[in-house]
Amino acid sequence: MSYSRAASGFLCVLSLSLVTAQVNTGSSALEQRIGRVQDRILPPVLIEGEPAQANKLADRMAALRVPGVSIAVIHDGRIEWARGFGVAKIGGAPVTPETLFQAASISKPVTALAVLRLVQSGKLNLDTDVNQYLKTWKVPENEFTSKNKVTLRGLLTHTAGITVHGFPGYASGEQLPAVVQVLNGQKPANTPAIFVETVPGTKWNYSGGGYVIAQQLLEDVTGKPFPKLMQESVLGPIRMTHSTYEQPLPAARIAEAATPYRRQGRPVPGGPHTYPEMAPAGLWTTPSDLAQYAIAVQKALAGTSNGILSAATTRQMLTPGLNKWGLGPETGGGSGHPYFTHGGSNDGFQSELVAYHDGDGAVIMTNGDNGAQLASEILRTIAYEYKWPDFQPAVHSISKVDPAVLDAYPGAYRLAPNAVVTVTREGNQLYAQLTGQPKQEAFPKREREFFLKAVDVEITFVAAAQGKTTKLILHQNGAERIAKRLDDTEAKQLSDAQAAAARRFQAQKQDSRTDPALRRLIGELWRGEPDYTQMTPAFADVIRQQLPQLPFVTRQLGAFQSMSFKGVGPAGADIYDVKFEKGVAEFRIMLAADGKVETMGFQPQ
């Protein structure tokens, strides 16, 4: 789906030979630099005095079942190198710098340039009610719009209070909706109606729906089809020569495109999905073309561009607002090294763009659903190689701590209603485990401060006056989250449940209750009539929030046909392959002691 990617809380096989294609290399020093990126994919944490446990890119691609990846690196305001690795299609041609990928949500900041060019020319105003510009469709008025109106500033920064996070796209052969049908949630649209659900300007909420409104507005104001408008106003002027917003991709260009693959290494049935929601999700492009977008923004900010945007407009675009979001891209970095960024996630495509204001950056595009993790690992390695101030692996040293103090830390700490961090001790080693995730070693930095190696997470234990810890603070991605210690009774219940889950995982023994529970739950959700009394309160809250989207998601799979037990996950969830009329999905379900559904998730295969 064309969704944003937020960092997950806590600890966040295909066989192929690596094929490379290149441009702009030239020097042996540069070849060595590229070789280090290719041969030494770094872990999230480095330990002082210890050799890095690096991996080859080919090995990480195979482990994550990502057939192909394309990379462009920007240095000193130009593309220093661009290369393709792996294959565009299993058994097919290698990825080259010209191979097309779906940019997914990176379509949004490129779309924002078109809006800002019209603002700069005086044809649009960022703070005017968008209904004054819209002709074909209007934002429905309600109690929220009576207080504040929806504006382009709100749409571009995800603060307009608009619904619909992202879009699943349309499989090959499916009927495509018109943009107005997408806006109204009318068949054959596979997402709900787009409307205002909170007072505009008061809350940040990522919304692909807001960019569909912007797409309709741009067509209404200019009188041009969206792909033509984007070609003339943005793609052409900034030399994104391989790119297009045409959906579907024209038949004459299919051979240029990578084939998308899902998590288990299977191709997306029918090939790439089609996204009539072009502004938020429809850009076909290459890393080198997206690097041209980044360079154009960098030059405009410095006042040396070819007129795509003025320096003043670009500064406004990159000014962080709610949730550090600008007019299109997300912003980050310290005052001395700001950057802009965006990720992209369509069915079978995952991408990442990062660019510093001062002329460095990288774009990574993949044709696998596990590509987000791979892109993060590649970005980390590039950051280390180019000595960026951000994104590099964390570097820690392991300190010696009096073993006697470790007794204060083991226990269960509630991070969220359905998430508990369990800290245990084995000898002089502490371990931390989040609900549903593997146990991780925790190493001491100082007496009360520990870190994990598998992911860049730090834990600080906080004690009351008498010395017993009352909570821990989780530090991840620049954010802090507090988890309070559970009392002994709650901790014992949790410990017993985890031990039982571990035994079932070891034995791969099915919980006899999950088969009928999953069959019942699938039927309820497919009908849109969940029985909340058969769920834990925390899981019921999750389903209530997701229920408006579920009928549209389930429509993609069709009617239930059969299911088979597949195994037990590390956290104790039973795993099932469920066959539907239009495909297969993997479901994971776990029940509480009283038989109520505690967790359930599914992923199309």
Image (spheres, grey):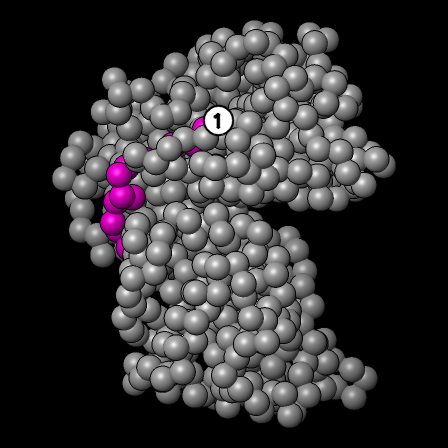
Residue at the image point whose x is 36% and y is 52% from the top: 558
* Magenta stretch: includes residue 268: yes
Q: Quadrant of residue 605?
A: bottom left
Q: Is residue 111 above or below residue 186?
A: above
Tell which of 455 and 309 is nearer to you: 309
* Percent position of residue 265, x then y: 26, 51
Kindly identify which residue carries mark 1.
178
The residue depicted at 78 percent of the width and 82 percent of the height is 464
Amino acid at the residue labelled 1: Ala
Give the prevailing secondary structure in the magenta stretch.
Answer: loop
Q: Which residues are magenta?
A: 264-276
Q: Using the image, determine if residue 124 lies above or below residue 391.
A: above
Residue 230 vs residue 525, the one in the foreground: 525
Residue drawn at x 49%, y 8% as measured from the top left: 232
- Quadrant in which residue 522 is drawn: bottom left
Q: How many marks?
A: 1
Residue at 52% of width from left, 58% of height from top?
528
Judging depth in this view, the residue of 56 and 376 nearest the camera is 376
Left or right side of 153 for 584: left
Helix, strand or loop for disc 1:
loop
Which quadrant of the figure contains the N terminus? top left
Q: Position of residue 542 (x, y in %)?
A: 59, 63
